[in-house]
DNA sequence: TATTGTTATACTCTATAACTATA
DNA sequence: TATAGTTATAGAGTATAACAATA
């Protein structure tokens, strides 16, 4: 997809304004999305750990602690809680008997999917408040935003 | 600003994909932005209260509690901490002697501005990783995202 | 009697320090 | 000796319940 090449060149000041709008909107939207929760009994970090496991397949407690910016003892507790809830499985590490391997269960996968579904539904309802042109602009930008988030 | 009217009409499935990309990107970006903190001694909610005060001018503790989705006793504590740090002022309510009015100080305003500046700088650096076309799309979408966040 | 805000107290989440088992 | 994970304990942050002052 491409744009007309006669689009006005924006000044540095407009770039700054766009960055500022991006930052504040992302922060505000995220706060509102976070409130749309499927399971009130899961803490934000527990949800985040499940998300990480969904992306990475499986991981050791140490890896999870580093990825979630949490200290190892905290992750021990989180993993134990998730295991008690039937959302993760712990297995011995095949090569290093000090380590363990944490894997998400089918139940966790279903819960995450339901969580995504619910938040998407909420966001879609919000998006319905935009007019055609506005949604077109946002739809075009969505993949870019996705790339940005992973840079 | 307008777009070519011959832009292909996207199907419902593409809408869903865009909403999904939007949701996950917003959540991921917000987590990363949140890590860029100016003052480690302020909790996320304390920061959020200052942001709310910056937007709304002043508010009573009860109003703040409702806006931040926090119980009144928690807000009592938060406001007391902010006052001790010189970031808010408490004054008697002019009409109702049960209530109080919380206002941010100049110091808080300066701190918030510095926080925005720092996070914008971080985000701008990330944006530099996009190519021209991508940034153009995002720049166009930024005001729309802003509208969406306030719907 | 209802509402605003506070005090007293308990729970949740995370951190640090010390310990165990394995490399 | 170093590393992965755990246990014990303490410190934030928030909640609920009971209370004081005002409407």
Image: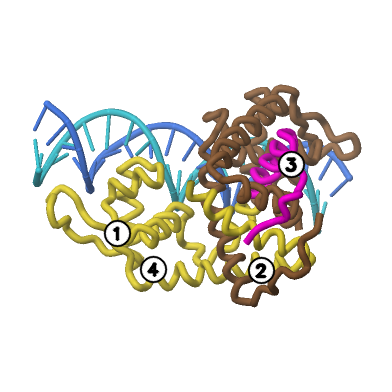
Chain colours: A brown, B yellow, C blue, D cyan
Q: Position of residue B24 (x, y in %)?
A: 67, 44
Disc on res. A77? none
- Residue B7 within the segment the image draws in magenta: yes
Residue at mark 4 to residue at mark 2: CA–CA distance: 24 Å
Q: Label 3 marks which chain's residue?
A: B
Q: Secondary structure at mark 1?
A: strand
Q: Label 4 marks which chain's residue?
A: B
Q: Which residue is mark 4?
A: B108
Name which quarter of the figure residue A91 lies in.
top right
The first of marks 4 and 2 along the sequence is 4
In this rendering, the label closer to the viewer, 2 or 3:
3
Q: Which residue appears at 57% of the width and 29% of the height? A: A38
Magenta stretch bounds: B1-28
Kindly indicate whether the residue at mark 2 contacts the one at mark 4 (C-beta within 8 angstroms).
Answer: no
The count of marks equals 4
Q: Which residue is mark 1?
A: B58
Residue at mark 2 to residue at mark 1: CA–CA distance: 31 Å
Disc on res. B124? 2
In this rendering, the label closer to the viewer, 1 or 3:
3
């Amino acid at each position: 997809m491409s744009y007309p090449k006669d689009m006005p060149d924006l000044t540095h000041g407009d770039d700054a304004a766009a960055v500022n709008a991006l930052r504040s909107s992302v922060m505000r939207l995220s706060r509102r999305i976070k409130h749309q929760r499927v399971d009130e009994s899961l803490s934000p970090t527990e949800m985040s750990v499940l998300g990480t496991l969904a992306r990475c397949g499986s991981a050791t407690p140490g890896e999870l602690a580093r990825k979630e910016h949490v200290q190892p003892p905290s992750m021990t507790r989180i993993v134990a809680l998730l295991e008690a809830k039937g959302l993760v499985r712990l297995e011995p590490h095949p090569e290093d008997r000090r380590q363990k391997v944490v894997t998400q269960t089918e139940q966790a996968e279903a819960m995450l999917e339901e969580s995504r579904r619910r938040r998407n539904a909420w966001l879609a309802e919000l998006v319905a408040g935009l007019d055609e042109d506005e949604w077109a602009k946002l739809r075009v930008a969505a993949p870019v935003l996705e790339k940005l988030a992973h840079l």
